[in-house]
Amino acid sequence: MYSIGVDIGTSTTEIIISNIKFSTRLGLSLLPATKIDETEVIYRSPVIFTPLISKTAIDFEQIRERIKAAFKESGIRKDQIETGAVIITGETARKDNARQVNIWLSEYLGDFVVAAAGPKLESVLAGRGAGISEESKKRSKRIINLDIGGGTLNAAVFDCGDCTETFAMDIGGRLIRLNDSRTVTYISDRIVHILENHKLSITPGETADIKVLERFCSYLADCCLQALGLQEMSEDTRLLYITDFTIPKDIDLISISGGVGEYVGVLNEIPDLEQWFRYGDIGPLLGTKLTQALAPWQSRLISPGEKISATVIGAGSHSLSVSGNTIGVDESILPIRNIPIIKCPAEPDQWETVFRSTRPLMELYEEDVLAVSIKGRKSPGYGELKTLAHQIASLYEGLKSPVIVLLKEDFAKALSQMIRIHTPCRKPVICLDQIQIENGDYIDIGSPVGSAVPVIIKTLVYQS
């Protein structure tokens, strides 16, 4: 199937189209398992500056025209696209019409395309798109990827291939912008406290002092080191966190992707003003200062497979999962999108408490359709399945929602049959397995493609 990725970032907008190949084969349990075999990027758009109508609004029409051009240049029609992600990142996610633009793009691209945004998911997709998930798996190491773009730093820790931690901060190359004469044209509100606390005189409308800009970028580089646990954390750095404050432990290797990552380890220490300010911002200078700051840990620094395109590669090639043959699906209600996932607190030996522990969590939501993620065991017995089926039927009783159950283990088909046959439930039933809930709180479920069902786990949290 074809997948599209669109990353509308603080500095730039990029589009990729990928070809995703998957197959069905017998797993270790001798049950059919559907796996993604290969993802190949078949088209990359030119990198363009993110079009804006004003300082507070994204130019949707220009972005749509760029996507139309991508279809024409790639030779792939819009109706061939079956999945993908549209992500508005960094400071652009804070624009007044960010949410509306994401909805418009999702509607324009079709029912199979997911509109996704949020710093946690962005961190994961950037790390995967940069190749760090695979690198971590191959080396059996804990690797942290810092994806530093125009407005934000998005970090993800991968341990032997699995993402275990994420965080995001207000660190980026376009937090300060300049014109050709190096007059300051913009300063992000997110960094004003640093300028004031460190008495750094950088003022809109005035010519920037290069030495002061160097000092500021050196401080931002130190903030990165503090976030990595390599320096003591300061209160100024704590205020830069967008997500919950965290310092990762036991990191083996460090990777830097994103636009700023293009300049980590590239420029030497001799000031090159043409290079530093070639894009009208502090991105290359920040990359230079981060290179200098990381010099004592040079042996732990690795180069990612993708840098500036990491997030869009992740969005278009790594946002999709598939649920395989051992599933139960009522196709009449598919595709469905943006379904909140409620994680059932009950352990596998507590299935008789599923209703009592989960129904209060479901009542916190006003949505008409809800999905429940349940912890299972590999080979549940008949009695256990019957208990779980009745608990789930009770869970959805009185609600408008169809029954949607997500499992990691391979017994979704048996569970769906148990719900239909042995409970009074008369709702449509969808039971999916091989679903790992780790980075998001919402799910999109597509119509079956062959014997598999495409799904995307995501978060729709916009930065404020």
Image (cartoon, rainbow, N blue to C red):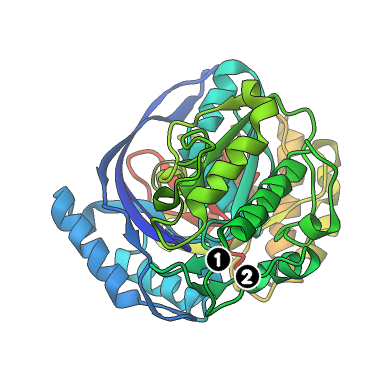
Q: Residue at 37% across / 38% down in the picture?
A: 451
Which label was assigned to residue 202? Answer: 2
Which label sits on residue 203? Answer: none
Question: Comparing marks 2 and 1, which lies closer to the viewer?
Answer: 2
Residue 20 vs residue 36: left or right?
Answer: left
Most foreground residue, 93 or 371: 93
Can you give x and y, in whole percent of width and height, for residue 356 in the image? 85, 58
Residue 39 lies, in percent from the top left, at 35, 34
Q: Nearer the viewer, residue 131 or 83?
A: 131
Q: Name the element at disc 1.
A: strand
Is the C-beta separation of discs 2 and 1 under 8 Å? yes
Q: Amino acid at mark 2?
A: Ile
Label 2, secondary structure: give it: loop
Disc with the residue nearer the chain's start (2 vs 1): 1
Name the residue that disc number 1 marks. 176
Residue 61 visible to the viewer: yes
- What amino acid type is highlighted by mark number 1? Ile
Q: Is 72 located above or below residue 455 in the figure?
A: below
Q: Position of residue 344 (x, y in %)?
A: 76, 51
Quarter of the figure with residue 236: bottom right
